Structures are given as C-alpha cells and as structure tokens.
Amino acid sequence: MALHEDQIQVTEVEKAMETASTSEKKTISTILIIIAMQTEALPVVNRFHLSEDPDDVFPKGVPWVRYHGIYKDLHINLIWPGKDSLLGVDNVGTVSASLVTYASVLALKPDLIINAGTAGGFKAKGACIGDAFLASDVAFHDRRIPIPVFDLYGIGARKVFCPSNMLKELNLKVGKLSTGDSLDMSPHDEASILANDTSIKDMEGAAVAYVADLLSVPAIFIKAVTDVVDGDKPTAEEFLQNLVTVTAALDHAIVQVVDFINGKCLSEL
Ligand code: SAH
C-alpha cells in the first residue's frame, strides 16, 4: 500500500532522528581543530606531535596547512589557514575560516570540530587575560542589515553544542562569543556586542559555527583572552603583548578538552 504524504514525512523525520542518535552514541574518533594564527597553532602541533600533511587534501595552490596525527584513541587534524600570499600575515577572519572549515569537513568527515584561538574579553562579563572560555552561543557583530528579518539573519545568533559534562569537569568559563572581521571595535559593533550580552570577541567563531551547522557537524569554541576590550589599553598593543603567554594557556585548555573527549561519544560530552 502506498504511503500517505504525512506518513512519508514522519518516516523521514524518524530516519533523521535515528541517524542523529546513532552518531551521538558513536565513540568520537576524528576531530578537526581550526586555528587561525600560526603562533596559536604551533604549540598545539608540537604538544600532540602532529605532522604536516605532504599529500594535501586541499585544492592545489591554497595556503591552508593540515597537521595530523594520532593521540590516544583520536585522529587529530589541525588546520591553519596559512599566510596571505602577498602580505605574508596569517589568514585571520571569517572568509578564510569558513572556507577552510567547509573544505576540511568535506575532506576529513570529522565527528567534532574545535575552533580554538585567542579573543578579546569583556571585564564587565568577568573576563581576565589568560582565561579560557567555552562559547555557549555565537553571533556576528558587524553584519548590519536594517530590514526586517534580514537584521536577524545578519546577526546570525545561534546556540552551539554544549558539552555540559566537560564544563562540570574542566576549569573553563562560559560565555557568548561575538565575531566580526575587525580587531578593533567601532561604536556600531559595540552596540551590537552589548545587546548580545557578549563575553568574548573574535574574528572567526561565528563563521565556523555557520559552516558546522550547514554540514551538521557539532562544534565547540575554546577561546583564550589576549586583551580586555572594555579596559584602558589599546587592543592591538595588548593583544601583541599577551599573545605568546596566552597561547600557552590556550594550549593547556585544548589538551584538557581533547583528553576529556578521548574515548567518549557526543552524548557523554
Ligand atoms: N596584529 C595581529 C593581528 C591578528 S588578528 C597579528 O599578529 O598578526 C587577531 C586574531 O586574534 C584573530 O584571529 C582573532 O580571532 C583573535 N582576537 C584576539 N583578540 C581579539 C579582539 N579583541 N577582537 C577580535 N579578535 C581578536
């Protein structure tokens, strides 16, 4: 007997739920770590003894670099978007972050994405230099489209995967992450950031979250605070001054998170 349209829809929903719950119960084996800056990435590469991939999984000519290796029961892939071919600086920001996330997920089919990096923190929300935060939500603060509904699309606020057991066990702060393509903060950005109850500010997180959602891969965001945005020091100066010491704190947080993930399935995180 032919199925009625409603029954077909129910069957499809059931199938999707079954697939989701199967992947939640599967032990995590492949993780994808996306890190924007070389200074942030190299301590992690060394810590997990990752090696650079000679047979590139990416299109020929792109500057993206894949480091990989086995750590405990995990296949770890760390992707750094490399340097700008003309200017020689790290490919920070949302455009590179979305491209490498998209290409890496297609090529490597990870069970979980970790976007790790540095961020500005708001002391009004309890952030101090060197703190490691796990993002509960992400949004964009520099995509202003003052037309109904497009305004919400621009902000692109979304909840991200919450590893509640990890939070209970590890010493991480939790807060909302806001992303934009500038290191500084314009008055418009500031208004959006305040309206969104933001604790930390970066240049990649919400872009990685967008692609992770698009491709249905859970993602977590670990950000260590290099500069206090609502403090008295100029951001660029404070960022550069703290970058190296804070990357050590970031590295420490990543190892704790990866150790926690090892041997578990998504529903246990
Ligand atoms: N002059 C720096 C520029 C790096 S851009 C250099 O050494 O090349 C800043 C990077 O750190 C981005 O990847 C961003 O995600 C993060 N970041 C740290 N503090 C930030 C802040 N206050 N606002 C936005 N991004 C910040």
Image (cartoon, helix red, strand yellow):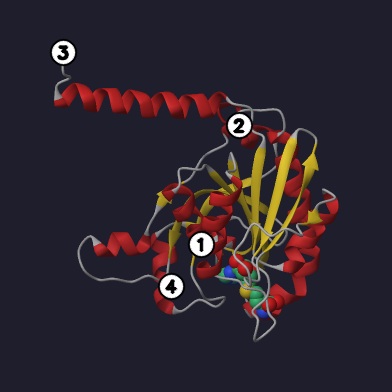
Q: Quadrant of ligand 1?
A: bottom right
For the N terminus, the quadrant is top left
Q: Quick check: is the Cβ at mark 2 less than 8 Å away from ligand 1?
A: no
Residue 9 drawn at (x, y percent): 23, 28
**Side of 135 relative to 148 (left or right):** right
Report the number of numbered marks: 4
Residue 119 drawn at (x, y percent): 62, 64
For the C terminus, the quadrant is top right
Residue with the mark numbered 4 = 189
Residue with the mark numbered 3 = 1
Residue with the mark numbered 1 = 98
Q: Quadrant of residue 101?
A: bottom right
First in sequence: mark 1 or mark 2?
Answer: 1
Badge 3 amino acid = Met
Residue 161, which numbered label? none
Q: How far, Cα to Cα, is label 4 from label 1?
A: 21 Å
Look at discs 1 and 3 and give the one toward the viewer. 3
The local secondary structure at tag 4 comes to: helix
Residue with the mark numbered 2 = 269
First in sequence: mark 4 or mark 2?
Answer: 4
Q: In front here: 259 or 1? A: 1
The local secondary structure at tag 3 comes to: loop
The local secondary structure at tag 1 comes to: helix
First in sequence: mark 4 or mark 3?
Answer: 3
Q: How far, Cα to Cα, is label 1 from label 2?
A: 25 Å
**Side of 246 relative to 160 (left or right):** right
Categorize mark 3 by other alpha carbons within 10 Å: few (<14), some (14-19), many (20+): few
